[in-house]
Amino acid sequence: MSGSASLLPLGPRGLSAKLSARLLANPATRRVRPSEAAWPSKTEWKRLNDEVGGNLIPVDFPIQPCISSVESTDCKTLFANVKNPYYIGDTPGMTQTLGWVDAWSTKPSVYAIAARNAGDIGAGVNFAREHNLRLVVKGGAHSYQGTSNAPDSLLIWTRHMHDVSLQDSFVPQGCAATPQRAATAGSGAIWFQAYDAVTTKAGGYVQGGGCTTVGVAGLIQSGGFGSFSKHYGMAAAGLLEAEVVTADGKVLIANACTNPDLFWALKGGGGGTFGVVSRLTLRVRDLPEFAGGANFKVKASSDDAFRRLIRQFVGFYRDALFNDHWGESVNIATENELKIEMVHIGLDTEQSRKIWKPFLDWVGQSSAYTIESEPEIGSMPLRHWWDVDWRKDHHHDVFKSDARTNASTENVWWKGDAGQVAWVVWGLESLWMPATLLQDDMQEKLANALFAASRFSGVGLHFNKGLAEAPADAIEGARDTAMNPAVCSALALAIVADGEGPAYPGVAGHEPDVASGRKAADNVHRCMNELRKVSPDGGAYVSESNFFESDFQHSYWGANHARLVEIKKKYDPDGLFFVHNGIGSERWSPDGFTRL
């Protein structure tokens, strides 16, 4: 035996060099990088390109010219476009968040498959598995935690898979269910495309995200909340069926009757974790006639007056707004300002103004408060909520538009979301706030915690992301997802965040402000710790949470984590799909390259 073994041509020559390198980089140890001998050859890459119909592309990094010279033409082009989410979405080497101080900075893959169908995705998955490559999936590229990018990787880019179609009598494969109205979207679709097809053009409603440029697939897989989720529930609960490519390269259908365990995991278990979703079918609801909002800002003249204002609002919210009509947020700001940015569904203008009158009367009775902006309270036809032409005709200046030559007039995003385009995160944390804090004997405690927190940073209370007082079917739907069950009894999701505009390491005059970022991160954490005093076991929302989340397994999924681990083992036993703080990520180094 030993004699015959010695005849094998071991060492750095011929076939053995490639074999040796592949063995060193096998799935039990680490993934391959371009500088290593086991990296696929040009011939192998060409073979993949042929298999995906010529849609394998080298990934350019638009920021690179700015590192060389901020005066270069290419760099000026970047800065002219970088605050445009459609430009970012159309660029495989970019992500909407540019980085997080002391955590990550956006970096491009080596190659991307501009996927057109599940077959292209399957070819990429097989290639990555067979060659032991780091694999990344990107649709909308909205991840705050950088999960849709990684250097030295192969990217499956689904941007071009964005068709949205409606079905009047959809029945999930393998189910004996009553046919229902549904919408099917490719995994590269963004929510504006879905809302335009379903609501503006067809007069229906599909529960998705609030931001128009968030990817449909990514939001569903993280749970997903939109402005009206207090009424309709989580976006993931509206998933009827998904087409997904698993780690073995197979194209599976997942719904309540076919691969139901995978279907459940896709509803809130985290994007890019269990497979690559290629298509989703979502429940379409009837469209209410009206939706609207309430927007204004109240300034308090002193700390004590601000504390009283918060206390008054807490009681008013419980009595008047704690129902499935009202969503979105209020911000308790460090400048002793209460910023109301709420929306409602199913109320006309007269009804919505009547609801707010007692609170505005209370504010107006004291010289300690100033309403700094005239309250905008009213309603509009919900069918026109995402209707660009209607908004323009009615002088609703709510959208920013893609100014690139030949860009579609439908390429719009809410002005209120502009700050998160090409930003660098300094700190971001979230916490589910239990509805028990609205009980009579707890309201003072909640108000005091909110005031104490606002001494460090502004606090956003996102009422549409807590499902307490939602209809029974919305609660039931949420319980049948992988989300932390705390969402079902939460009055709101508290979010504390800070950051800066476009910045990147090595770009002269545009480097991230690390010192300010670290100080802000500390303030964000101290702010949230004041809220943790009244919600010590609240948990967090995976899509809007701390990169350094403590005990993320419990925070994101609670008691559902153990079941998700078993599903991960079943469909991706070797951990081909890796995302930061995702299911099974503990088995890998932080960059996803080395198995621990």
Image (cartoon, rainbow, N blue to C red):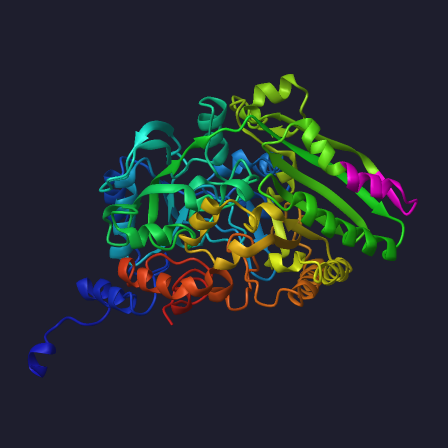
Residue at x-position 78% and y-position 60%:
455
Locate residue 286, reporting x and y percent.
Answer: 46, 29
Q: Quadrant of the N terminus?
A: bottom left
Residue at x-position 45% and y-position 55%:
483
Residue 546: image quadrant is bottom right
Q: Is residue 509 visible?
A: no
Front in this rendered view, residue 113 or 161: 161
119 relative position to 401: left or right: left
Please give the count of numbered marks on the rendered protein: 0
Query: Please, is residue 455 above or below residue 125 in the view?
Result: below
Q: Quadrant of the C terminus?
A: bottom left
Q: Is residue 162 visible?
A: yes
Front in this rendered view, residue 441 or 267: 441
Locate residue 13, reporting x and y percent.
Answer: 21, 66
Residue at x-position 50% and y-position 32%:
192
19 relative position to 537: left or right: left
Locate residue 363, reporting x and y percent.
Answer: 84, 43
Q: Is residue 228 magenta?
A: no
Residue farthest top in this picture: 393
Residue at x-position 50% and y-position 40%:
232
Q: Is residue 362 magenta?
A: yes
Front in this rendered view, residue 483 or 145: 483
Residue 429: image quadrant is bottom right
Residue farthest bottom in this picture: 2
547 relative position to 397: left or right: left
- Magenta segment: 357-371
